[in-house]
Image: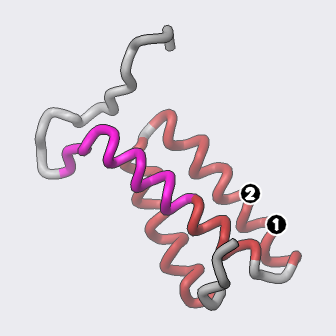
Amino acid sequence: MAAGHPVVPEGADGGPKAFQGQEFYLRLAQRLKEAHRRADSLPEPVRIPLIRRLLTVTEGVKRDPLKASERLDRMLAELSEQAPDPPTR
């Protein structure tokens, strides 16, 4: 994508699942950071596959941000069951 061209995800037409532009991506980035923070508190045999899944979600944001966001929501729900809320750095 050329510099200066904003990334506008498909479906940004104001439909029921409309994006909020920068706010959507900011919140998505915050949630990805939270997921990585929680994953870091898990034992290595669990942490490594989980981080690979998170990287897949991160890559998926480029293709389908809404689908990646939904997948991240499911992963955060799983993480809340597996990992206690670790202290922030």
Look at 57% across and 90% down and name the residue there. Answer: 81
Q: CA distance from mark 1 to mark 2?
A: 6 Å
Q: Dividing the picture into quarters, in which one does residue 46 lie?
A: bottom right
**Residue 32 location in percent, x, y?**
55, 59
Q: Looking at the picture, does residue 25 appear above or below residue 37?
A: above
Tag count: 2
Are the residues flagged by discs 1 and 2 in contact, CB closer than 8 Å?
Answer: yes
Query: Which residue is at the front of the view, 78 or 38?
Result: 38
Give the magenta part as a residue range: 17-32
Residue 30 covered by magenta stretch = yes
**Residue 79 location in percent, x, y?**
59, 80
Query: Which residue is at the front of the view, 35 or 59?
Result: 35
Dominant secondary structure of the magenta stretch? Answer: helix
Quadrant housing the C terminus: bottom right
Q: Secondary structure at mark 2?
A: helix
Look at 47% across and 71% down and name the residue there. Answer: 74
Residue 9 covered by magenta stretch = no
Three-letter amino acid code of the residue under disc 2: Arg
Taking the image as shown, residue 80 lies to the left or right of residue 65, namely right
Taking the image as shown, residue 72 lies to the left or right of residue 22, namely right
Taking the image as shown, residue 7 lies to the left or right of residue 53, namely left
In this figure, which residue is indicated by the disc labeled 2? 52
In this figure, which residue is indicated by the disc labeled 1? 48
Q: Looking at the picture, does residue 30 appear above or below residue 76?
A: above
**Residue 16 location in percent, x, y?**
13, 51
| Circle 2 crowding by C-alpha within 10 Å: few under 14, some 14–19, many from 20 | few
**Residue 11 location in percent, x, y?**
23, 36
Look at 43% across and 40% down and name the residue there. Answer: 64
Three-letter amino acid code of the residue under disc 1: Ile
